Image: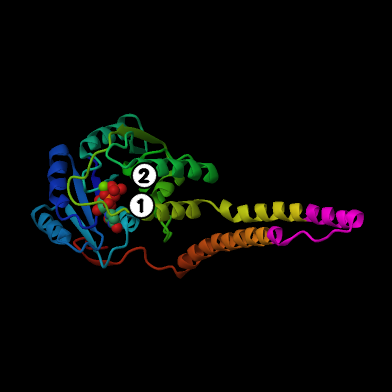
Amino acid sequence: MDLLSIVVPCFNEEESVEIFFKEIQKVLADQNYEIIYINDGSSDNTLKKIKKLANENSNIKYISFSRNFGKESAIYAGLKNASGDLVCLIDVDLQHPPSLIPEMIETVYNEDYDVVAARRVSRKGEPKIKSFFSHLFYKVFNRITNMDLAEGATDYRVMRKPVVDAILKMPEYNRFSKGLFHWVGFNTKWIPYENIERVAGETTWSFWGLVQYSIEGIVAFTTIPLSISTFIGTIISIIAFIYMIFIVIRYLIYSDPVQGYPTIMCVILFLGGIQLLSIGVLGKYLEKTYVETKNRPIFIVKESNIDDI
Ligand code: UDP
Ligand code: MG
């Protein structure tokens, strides 16, 4: 029987770690699987709980980071150390119902898919404003990157080994997993599921955090914003040129070159604003390039029960 590796990022999830394992045991009773818990620098007893489980069950592995590196880094570490023919990526808080795993595995084999991923179809229990901005993000992202990320797409998925290998071939520091998963291609089937509340603990995502994350995603997958300033600059130059000719002609006819202070202020502020905005956009890309060229590790392991990590 093929081995299934289950990769589970955990950040301050002391209450969920065990509940999650019980649930997996129930769902995958007769399967050949391993669980890889990644402790992403939790400040609570998450690591202790994981180690206890690992001591009692030989199919539990763990990787503990030296600090919090973020879920994207945890995913990378997990995928890198997964040895299964199939790899499942899932949240520990049970918001990704483990009961879907058998169906996902079956679909991979029976319908010959490389990836089977879960897509949230309802946003129940989520603030309206969050849903609105999320919707807006997918619209904008897909428009300017020419990709078609499915709305409600989650990280929750079962992948065949070649897909995992393809993702690992992208060792970039700025990791926008949703985009990376889509970018590698392969045929993917989406399984719909209803949104559910966390079993315990709290989400670490703030609204501002999500906004930042969206910007990271856009910067990582398109350079269009860089061209936008060139475009606006060209348009404004053309308008300015026409206006200049207009003023000269008017002076020649009416001898009245004085146009007043407000117009000049408006133009100066408008152009100043656009220039600063453009420099900001440029700066964002420069920042990403700078961070990327430093070539720092995506994560640092403090301890683990995997030998050749
Ligand atoms: N997580 C992580 N590192 C982080 C933040 C989150 O490994 O810095 C894990 C977390 O433990 C959980 C998953 O990523 O298993 C999803 O996080 P969360 O539930 O906070 O996000 P949400 O479900 O609200 O999108
Ligand atoms: Mg969650």
For the point 37% across and 43% down, the residue is 129
Looking at numbered disc 1 in the image, what kind of residue is underneath it?
Phe
Q: Nearer the viewer, residue 230 or 180?
A: 230
Q: Nearer the viewer, residue 65 or 16?
A: 16
- Residue 230 visible in the snapshot: yes
Q: Residue furthest bottom?
A: 294
3D distance between C-alphas at marks 1 and 2: 8 Å
Percent position (x, y) of residue 18? Answer: 13, 50
Marker disc for residue 207: 1
Q: Residue furthest right?
A: 253
For the point 48% across and 51% down, the residue is 218
Q: Is residue 264 above or below residue 88?
A: below
| 243 falls in the magenta region | yes
**Of pointers 1 and 2, the one earlier in the residue sequence:** 2
Percent position (x, y) of residue 73? Answer: 33, 58
Q: Secondary structure at mark 2?
A: helix
Marker disc for residue 130: 2
Q: Main secondary structure of the magenta part?
A: helix
- Badge 1 density bin: few <14, some 14–19, many ≥20, Cα 10 Å: few
For the point 11% across and 52% down, the residue is 57
